Every structure is written in C-alpha cells, then in structure tokens.
Image (tube, helix red, strand yellow):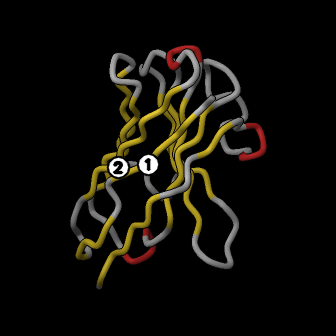
Amino acid sequence: QVQVEESGGGLVQEGGSLKLSCLASGFTFDDYSMAWFRQAPGREREGVSCVTWSGINKYYADSVKDRFTILRDNGKRTVYLQMNSLTPEDKETYYCAVGSDLYCTEVWKDKIYQHWGQGTKVTVSA
C-alpha cells in the first residue's frame, strides 16, 4: 500500500524559512519522480516543484524559483522542499505527490500524479 506523509509545516514570519519533508513507502521510490503542489482555500491546486528519480533534474514554478529548493534522498525514501524568503502569498497547504514516471512528465498536470499525501499547512505572518 502506497503511503505518502508530509511534515514540517507551521507558522513562520515573512522572510523566514521552512523545510518540508515527505516520507513515502509502498513502492520502489527511485522508480518515480516526486513533486510538491500547494493549494489555498477556494483556489486551484498549483504545482510548486518536481524532482526526477535521480534527484538531478528539478523543476520549479516561476513563483518559487530562486527561493525554494527540492531535494530527494532515495536511501531515506524522502523528498524535501526547502522554502526561503517566504511571503504571505506562500501561505497554503502543501502536498507531496508521486509522479507517473521517472522524469516529471507533464509536471504541472496534477491529474497525472498517482498518490498524494494529506498535506501540511504553511502559514506566513506579515
């Protein structure tokens, strides 16, 4: 059974940093890309970042480029999202998702992602 569990969300002041973690199990972790999405109430889910199976190729939404970094540790079956220079616009629930293949194919189409975590909430105070 595939399980995906996010952690690390919380309250941070504007300009601060948070590091999210996503622990996955129940499948061959390094056979799949992994991604982070986020969603605010009343808004569509937005792709944030994706990392290919090897951890070498990474993709970022324009809104987070140069502020967020995605990393994966295949030995620990974990993917991380280091978030720096946070703004109130980053205040959303962040979800980890298992990709459909090795390579972040159709990276921002949320429907292609097979399995999702329950989300971790990030709050940024001005």
Question: Which residue is found at the position 59% from the left and 41% from the top?
Answer: 97
Q: Secondary structure at mark 2?
A: strand
Q: How many marks?
A: 2
The reply to whether dot 1 and dot 2 touch (C-beta < 8 Å) is yes
Residue 93, label in figure: none
The C terminus lies in quadrant: bottom left
Question: Which residue is found at the position 37% from the left and 51% from the top?
Answer: 7
The N terminus lies in quadrant: top right
Nearer to the camera, 115 or 60 = 115
Kindly identify which residue carries mark 2.
20
Q: Residues within 10 Å of mark 1 (few under 14, many from 20)?
A: many
On screen, residue 45 above or below 43? above
On screen, residue 123 above or below 85? below
Question: Which residue is found at the position 47% from the left and 31% from the top?
Answer: 58
Is residue 8 toward the left or the right of residue 46 in the image? left
Instruction: Find the residue positioned furthest to the right.
Output: 111
Q: Counting residues from the N terminus, which is met first, the one under dot 1 or under dot 2?
A: 1
Residue type beneath disc 1: Glu
Q: Secondary structure at mark 1?
A: strand
Between circles 1 and 2, the one closer to the viewer is: 1
Is residue 37 toward the left or the right of residue 56 in the image? right
Q: Residues within 10 Å of mark 2 (few under 14, many from 20)?
A: many
Residue 112 position within the rendered picture, expressed as x and y whole percent measured from the top left? 76, 37
Instruction: Find the residue positioned furthest to the bottom.
Output: 126
Kindly identify which residue carries mark 1.
6
Question: Which residue is found at the position 42% from the left and 36% from the top?
Answer: 23
Instruction: Find the residue positioned furthest to the front.
Output: 1
Residue type beneath disc 2: Leu
Residue 93 position within the rendered picture, expressed as x and y whole percent measured from the top left? 50, 65
Is residue 96 toward the left or the right of residue 116 in the image? left
